[in-house]
Amino acid sequence: MNIPLIPDLSNPKWLIIQQILKTIGSKRSQKMRADKNTKTSYFLKTCIKILVLADTFEKDYSYVISE
């Protein structure tokens, strides 16, 4: 049984994740991902967030997606 991913700001991992996700969602990052197709840019941002969360907490990608 997997533990749910509940943000706990006293946990150092969540503080790091919070900064990473803020950077991924920033305007500068969005310009770097800019593409003629905006759906591709949004999809890429979502994929990066899933990868970062799964790798940081050592969970399966499917589990992070279902959360």
Image (cartoon, rainbow, N blue to C red):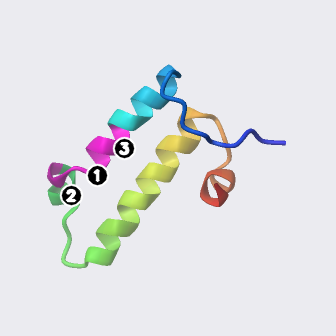
Examine the structure image and report whether residue 22 is included in the region drawn in magenta: yes
In this view, 59 is above or below 35: above
Q: Which mark is residue 14?
A: none
Q: Quadrant of residue 58?
A: top right
The amino acid beneath tag 3 is: Leu
The residue depicted at 85 percent of the width and 42 percent of the height is 1
Per the image, label 2 sits on a secondary structure element best described as helix
As helix, strand or loop, the secondary structure at mark 1 comes to loop
State if disc 2 and disc 1 touch (CB < 8 Å): yes
Camera-side residue of 52 and 18: 18
Q: Amino acid at mark 1?
A: Gly
Q: Residue at x 54, y 37 (%)?
A: 7
Mark 3–mark 2 distance (CA, rounded to whole Å): 12 Å
Q: Earlier in the sequence, mark 3 or mark 2?
A: 3
Q: Residues within 10 Å of mark 3 (few under 14, many from 20)?
A: some
Q: Nearer the viewer, mark 3 or mark 2?
A: 3
Task: Give the numbered dot on residue 25.
Answer: 1
> Callout 1: few (<14), some (14-19), or many (20+) C-alpha neighbours within 10 Å?
some
Location of the C terminus by quadrant is bottom right
| Mark 1 and mark 3: Cα distance apart in space | 6 Å
Q: Where does the magenta region start and end?
A: 20-28
Residue at point 43%, 60% (across, down): 46
Mark 2 or mark 1, which is nearer the start of the sequence?
1
- The image quarter containing residue 19 is top left
Distance (Cα) linking label 1 and label 2? 7 Å
Q: Which residue is mark 3?
A: 21
Q: Is residue 35 left or right of residue 15?
A: left
Q: Residue at x 51, y 52 (%)?
A: 50
Q: Residue 23: x and y, percent? A: 27, 42
Q: Please identify the dominant SS of the magenta region.
A: helix
